[in-house]
Image: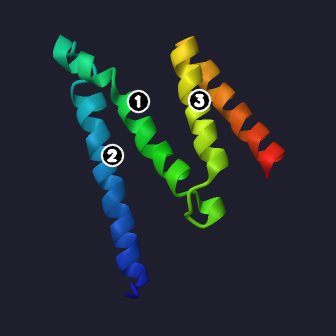
Amino acid sequence: MSMTTTQIWTIIIGLGLGSYLLRLSFLGIIGNRDLPEWVLRHLRYTAVAVMPGMITPMILFPQATGGTLDGVRLAAAMATIAISFWTKNATLTIFGGAAVLFALHFTLG
């Protein structure tokens, strides 16, 4: 399916406006007000919900291997989960997982 330049720019501008309006609804309209406790409780888990959704496809279907499961990435993911449970520290988990990934990648190929 081929699209014209006008169609592409219309989509880009439309998505930009939609993104802007979503952010405006939180920052511009209710940005100065106190949010109810139940909203704040749910917002605390945003990163916990978003990060696995972004990372899981990179573990299960990595582009570097043509979309096939890679033992090195799977082992690094399991090590990262173990580091997370052991340290309870997000920064150590991220850097520890990256270190395990690079170490396994250079050790096992």
- Residue at position x 37%, y 87% from top? 1
Tag in front: 1 or 2: 1
Q: Is residue 61 visible?
A: yes
| Residue at the image position 67 percent from the left and 46 percent from the top | 72
Judge depth for marks 1 and 3 and give the one in front.
3
Query: If you read the primary sequence from the N terminus, does the residue marked by circle 1 or circle 2 appear first?
Result: 2
Location of residue 79 (image quadrant): top right
**Residue 54 appears left or right of 18:** right
Q: Where is residue 44 drawn, in percent x and y?
A: 33, 20
Number of numbered markers: 3
Q: State the SS at label 1.
A: helix
Mark 3 crowdedness (10 Å alpha carbons): few <14, some 14-19, many ≥20: many
Viewer-closest of 43 and 16: 43
Give SS at disc 2: helix
Badge 3 or badge 2: first in the primary sequence: 2
Residue in the picture at 63% in, 19% down: 92
Amino acid type for the residue under numbered disc 2: Tyr
**Mark 1 closeness class: few <14, some 14–19, many ≥20 residues within 10 Å:** few
Q: Nearer the viewer, mark 3 or mark 2?
A: 3
**In the picture shown, does residue 18 fall above or below 80?**
below
Q: CA distance from mark 1 to mark 2?
A: 20 Å
In the image, residue 80 lies at what x, y percent?
Answer: 59, 29
Q: Residue at x 40, y 85 (%)?
A: 4
Q: Is residue 36 visible?
A: no
Instruction: Give the vertical position of 64 relative to 49 (above or below).
Output: below
Q: Is residue 17 left or right of residue 47?
A: left
Kindly identify which numbered label has been placed on residue 20. 2
- Callout 1 amino acid: Ala
Query: Residue at label 3?
Result: 80
Distance of label 3 from label 2 (alpha carbons): 35 Å
Residue identified by numbered label 1: 47
Q: Is residue 3 above or below residue 9?
A: below
